[in-house]
Image: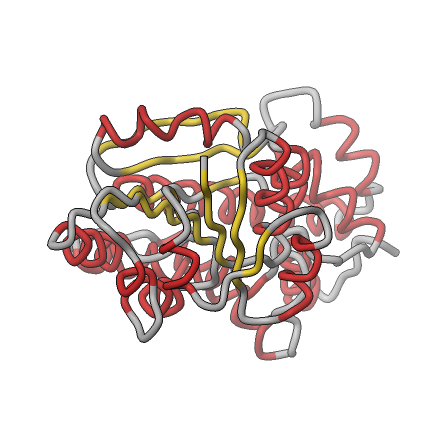
């Protein structure tokens, strides 16, 4: 197929490459040159704008930062909507507001353009290894048509319901992973403060009911002092903000989510927003006057 890809950052770049490896032609556009150059070097064509990419494509993927970014790429000046024709499918794999997703889809519908919201979980490793979990909202018949494309990018592809459902499920995912991450941090600081080696504690509980992706993948990085990002603190904060907005609209209390968001806010206040989400342990260490990696 003739595909377009907009947003060639830490996640988008390997995802775009997987689509090329699957045999599709690709036109790309990004707000910065390194992402474009990396894909052009392996055979992609460079688009002049989001509108230009849409005009050359049957399906356009976006993987950008936040709701305003998707709105600008989709509906702004030289956006997808200005270069598109009826029949185009826009697959947005960013994590954004379900409300914004539905509003964009409604604008597209006026021009006969389809939209799928398809946020992902799995971080940089999942993007590089094509093992992402993909949560999709939109029309079921459009999802079925695009499913082979999703299978080139991820290991678990789930249709979640009408427009906005994929984004809602992704926010549920972020609630679960962030609160679990906080629990892992609390276990580490408790072990250290109580005089048990945190590494020994991890070994003891990793094979039981406490096992989680965060425990197995992030806790060793915390102990090693490795805070390089697979998923950045500020990205996590953006997702938690969206989850709390949805909860507020539904008059739903999410106390654990609110607490972990405040802990991440303390990291941002210290200028640590670019670090990986495993840096959450620093906030718990500061509160408890303890260092788990000592």
Q: Quadrant of residue 259?
A: bottom left
The correct choice, above or below, for 90 with respect to 143 in the image is below
Q: Nearer the viewer, residue 2 or 145?
A: 2
Please state, as top left, top right, bottom left or bottom right, where the N terminus lies in the image. top left
Q: Residue at the top extreme?
A: 208
Could you say where residue 21 lies in the image, as x and y percent from the top left? 64, 33
Residue in the image at 58% along x and 62% along y: 233
Type of colouring:
secondary structure
Count of numbered circles in the view? 0
Q: Residue at the left extreme?
A: 110
Q: Nearer the viewer, residue 150 or 190?
A: 150
Could you say where residue 243 lies in the image, as x and y percent from the top left? 34, 54
The correct choice, above or below, for 7 with respect to 57 in the image is below
Q: Nearer the viewer, residue 217 or 93?
A: 93
Residue in the image at 73% along x and 53% along y: 41
On the picture, is 179 further left or further right than 111? right
Could you say where residue 240 lies in the image, as x and y percent from the top left? 41, 57
On the picture, is 109 further left or further right than 4? left
Please state, as top left, top right, bottom left or bottom right, where the C terminus lies in the image. bottom right
Q: Quadrant of residue 170?
A: top left
Residue in the image at 42% along x and 44% along y: 119
On the picture, is 241 further left or further right than 265? left
Q: Residue at the right extreme?
A: 294
The correct choice, above or below, for 71 with respect to 194 in the image is below
Could you say where residue 270 lies in the image, as x and y percent from the top left? 64, 78
């Amino acid at each position: 197929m003739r595909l377009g890809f907009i947003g060639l950052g830490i996640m988008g770049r390997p995802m775009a490459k997987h689509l090329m490896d699957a045999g599709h032609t690709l036109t790309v556009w990004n707000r910065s040159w390194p992402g474009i150059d990396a894909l052009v070097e392996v055979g992609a064509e460079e688009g002049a704008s989001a509108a230009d990419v849409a005009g050359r494509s049957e399906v356009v993927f976006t993987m950008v930062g936040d709701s305003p970014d998707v709105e600008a790429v989709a509906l702004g000046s030289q956006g997808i909507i200005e270069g598109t024709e009826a029949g185009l499918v826009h697959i947005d794999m960013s994590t954004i507001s379900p409300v914004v997703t539905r509003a964009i889809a409604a604008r597209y519908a006026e021009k006969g353009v389809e939209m799928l919201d398809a946020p992902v979980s799995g971080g940089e490793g999942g993007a590089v290894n094509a093992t992402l979990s993909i949560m999709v909202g939109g029309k079921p018949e459009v999802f079925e048509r695009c499913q082979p494309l999703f299978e080139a990018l991820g290991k678990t592809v789930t249709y979640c319901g009408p427009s906005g459902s994929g984004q809602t499920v992704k926010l549920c995912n972020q609630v679960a992973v962030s609160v679990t991450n906080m629990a892992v941090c609390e276990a580490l600081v408790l072990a250290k403060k109580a005089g048990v080696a945190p590494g020994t504690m991890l070994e003891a509980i990793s094979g039981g009911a406490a096992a989680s992706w965060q425990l197995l993948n992030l806790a060793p990085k915390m102990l090693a002092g490795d805070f390089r990002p697979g998923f950045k603190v500020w990205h996590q904060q953006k997702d938690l903000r969206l989850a709390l907005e949805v909860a507020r609209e539904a008059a739903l209390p999410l106390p654990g989510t609110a607490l972990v968001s405040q802990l991440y806010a303390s990291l941002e206040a210290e200028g640590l927003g670019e670090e990986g989400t495993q840096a959450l342990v620093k906030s718990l260490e500061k509160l408890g006057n303890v260092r788990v990696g000592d």
